[in-house]
Amino acid sequence: MNYKKKKLITIGVVCEMTGLSERQIRYYEERELIFPDRSKGGTRKYSFFDIERLMDIAEKMEDGMQTFEIKRLDKKKNTSLRDQMIKGQINARFGQQNEAKGPNR
Amino acid sequence: MNYKKKKLITIGVVCEMTGLSERQIRYYEERELIFPDRSKGGTRKYSFFDIERLMDIAEKMEDGMQTFEIKRLDKKKNTSLRDQMIKGQINARFGQQNEAKGPNR
DNA sequence: CGTGTAAGGAATTCTGACACG
DNA sequence: CGTGTAAGGAATTCTGACACG
């Protein structure tokens, strides 16, 4: 939908924008930190979102973080995001029933 | 600055998104309707803006318009836009003359 | 005028492997 | 573990030209 999420950019451009090598970018994919699309011919396509993600990864790597840690961290983020959305739906349904008790604050 | 204006997309992707052939896209460039960037190696790079522009061009071509007409039309649009901006600056300076004192000096 | 196409070459990307550490 | 690199091939793109109309 959004420009940011469309996977249309080749790896060469991503290299330029992130300062990472092709090797690094492909390795991060191997470690399941990013998930580019593929053209019919098999060339990888990245989104602006992926590029931002890669710049974030690059920073964490420079700080000495390892790929599996970054992945774990990301999983946690998604989980808590999911929890928040579920919580939101619950609130939408049963809202303000127990306002007195604040769960975790 | 904006994602929409960054010229990063290859011609193949532009073809997919616009439904135009490479030949058509290159021809519209030859006629100075679009202005892609180039990589070091010489491959063309387009922006989301360019893609929208091309879809607009395609529509006009289908309506029987010729490339020079489209270009002329575009020039007019830019000219009137420039005029508006100049007018805007003039207004900013000399606009509310009836006011006691000019805001900038 | 606008577009298709075949031709030949150059730039880009891909995979799997070896290397270092 | 994370990254560089040389190897060979495949996908992608480029230009200039001929063709049709």
Image (cartoon, coloured by chain):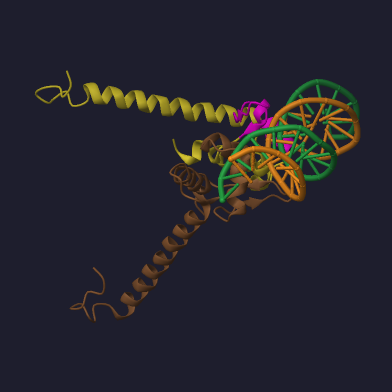
Chain colours: A brown, B yellow, C orange, D green
**B88 or A12: nearer the eye?**
A12
**Left or right: residue A69 compared with residue A88:** right
Q: How many numbered marks have been drawn onto this rendered protein structure?
A: 0
Q: Quarter of the image holding residue B10?
A: top right
Residue at the far left in the pictured view: B100
Magenta includes B38?
yes
Instruction: Using the image, determine if residue B10 lies above or below residue A88.
Output: above
Instruction: Using the image, determine if residue D19 lies above or below residue C19.
Output: above
Q: Is residue A10 visible?
A: no
Instruction: Using the image, determine if residue A74 lies above or below residue A95.
Output: above
Q: Give the residue displayed 47% in from the left and 28% down from the top.
A: B78
Q: Quarter of the image holding residue B66?
A: top right
**A23 or C2: nearer the eye?**
A23
Q: Give the residue displayed 31% in from the left and 27% down from the top.
A: B88
Give residue B80's position: percent from left, percent from top: 43, 27
Give residue B2's position: percent from left, percent from top: 45, 38
Q: Quarter of the image holding residue D9?
A: top right
**B51 or B38: nearer the eye?**
B38
Q: Give the residue displayed 67% in from the left and 31% down from the top.
A: B43
Magenta includes B72?
no
Q: Is residue B72 visible?
A: yes
**Left or right: residue A62 compared with residue D8:** left
Give residue C8's position: percent from left, percent from top: 88, 27
**Left or right: residue A105 compared with residue A10:** left
Image quarter where the C terminus of chain A lies is: bottom left
Report the magenta residues as a range.
B22-45
**A86 or A3: nearer the eye?**
A86
